[in-house]
Image (cartoon, helix red, strand yellow):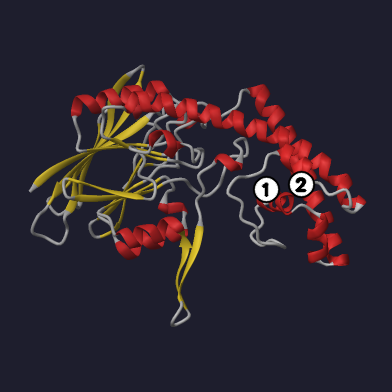
Amino acid sequence: MEKIKIFHSADMHGDLDSLDTYIEYVREKKPDITLVTGDLVHGVFTEEELKQYMKHRELYEGTKMSLLGKVIEEAKKIGKEKIMELFPPQLFQAIQEDSLKEKSIIDIHEDNEPSTKDLHEMINPKTPPAIANAISPYLDARETYQKYVQTGRESMESQYRDIKRIIENTDCLILPGNHDGECLEEILSEKNIHKKSVTTKDIKIAGYGSAAGMPVWIPSALLEKFRGIKVVNKQEKELVYDGSEAGWFMIEEDPDIAVFHETPLIDESLMAYVKNESPYLILAGHLHEGIGIYKFNEGSHLILPGKLGNPDMEPKDHSTLRTFVEIDLLKEKETSVRLQPEKVTFHQIKNGKIEPFAEYKFDEHGNFKSKENISKDCSSLKGWL
C-alpha cells in the first residue's frame, strides 16, 4: 500500500500573498500532487476603467445589434445575394461573430480578423442608406470597446506572469475558472491541465476548468468558456450524451482523479458523470463557502477546499476564508478500489501563517471514521461529510 499526498486550493482571485504562503508550505511538505483549481485573477480593470468599460460595452452592443437588424431587414427586401454584393462580407462576419450568432446569412472564414480601419475602407458607396448610417456608429463603438478588451487582456497576462513566478520550479497544476482568460494557456501552458490529462505515481488526473456563469465586468472575448454539447450516435441516430463538455471529456478520459473548477453539486451534467462513472476522487472549487467532503458512491469522494483568496466582498460569516485542503490517500495495488482517503485536513492562512482547523480520518475501507476540530478560532469554517 502506497501513501499519496495532495494539496488542493481554489479561487485565489488575485491574492498573490495567499498563493505565495500556500506554495511555500507546499515546498516544505513536498506532496505528490499540488493543485490550484480556478479563478486565479481578480478583475482586469481599475474602478474608473470599469465604469468606462461598462458604458462603452453597452454602446457597442446597441450599435452592433442595430446594424445587424438593419442588414437582415434589408436582406429580406432585396435578397441575401444582393445585399452581400453591396455589403462587405468581412464586415458582416464581424457583426455575426461579435453577436455570437451561430448561423450566418453567409459563410466566410478569414484567417485574420480585419481591423476597424480595414472595415471602414470596405464600405461600398452603394450600400443602402439605412445600413450605411448605422455602420460608422458601430465601427466607432467597436474600436473603443476593443481597446478595453486589450486593456483587460494585458491586465490578465500581467497577473498570470506573477502567478508563474510564484509557482515556478514546483509541480503545481492549475485550471482556469470562470474569471480566467484563454491567455492563461499562453503563459502557463506547462502548468495548465484544462482539457488535459497527466499521470503521477501511476494515478491519472484529468482537468477541466471554467464554470457556467461569466462575470459581467470581464470582456466575454477574454474568458475561457464552459460549454454544453450533445453527442449523437450517427448510425443509430440516438442521443448518447447531453450535458457539459466537461462531463463528456471526463467520460472519455476516465481518470482516477477528476479536477474541475465548477462544483458537480451545482451542475446537473457533472453530477451525472460523478454518479455514473464514480472516479475515486473529485476535486473542485467555485463555491467559496463550500468547504468539506461529500461521498457520492462507494469509494468516490468530492472534496472542496473553500476559497484561497482574499475574503473581500464575502458574507460576514465567511470572513475567515483563505483556506485549502491537505489530502492523504492510500493507493491499493491489488484491489478494485485503487485510491481511498486516509486523512483530510483543512487549513486556513491567518496573518501569513498556516493553521489546521479540521481533520477527517477514514478507516481502511475509505469510510468516514472521525472528525477533529483542531482550531477553535476557525470554528466558523465547518466542513461537511
Within 10 angstroms of label 1, few (less than 14), some, or many (20 or more) residues? some
* Residue 267, numbered circle: none
Report the amino acid beneath label 1: Asp
Closest to the observer, 289 or 9: 9
Is 67 left, or right, of 341 in this rendering?
right
Q: Is residue 213 above or below residue 217?
A: below
Instruction: Tell me what residue is drawn at x 60 percent, y 31 percent.
Output: 150
Residue at the spot 60% in from the left edge and 27% down from the top edge: 45
N-terminal of the two: label 2 or label 1?
A: 2
Instruction: Answer whether residue 58 is visible to the viewer in this image.
Output: no
**Number of marks drawn:** 2
In screen coordinates, is 128 left or right of 213? right
Q: Is residue 143 left or right of residue 172?
A: right
- Identified by mark 2, the residue type is Lys
**Residue 85 screen position, x and y as percent:** 80, 59
Which residue, given by chain and number where applicable, does mark 1 sit on?
Answer: 98
Point out residue 360 in the picture as x, y percentages from the top left corner: 23, 41
Residue shown at 17%/58% (left/top)? 337
Q: Which mark is residue 64?
A: 2
Figure quadrant of residue 55: top right
Quadrant of the rendered image containing residue 56: top right
* Label 2 with label 1: CB-CB less than 8 Å: yes
User: x, y percentage for residue 79?
Assistant: 83, 67
Q: Residues within 10 Å of mark 2 (few under 14, many from 20)?
A: many
Task: Say left or right for 116 vs 368.
Answer: right
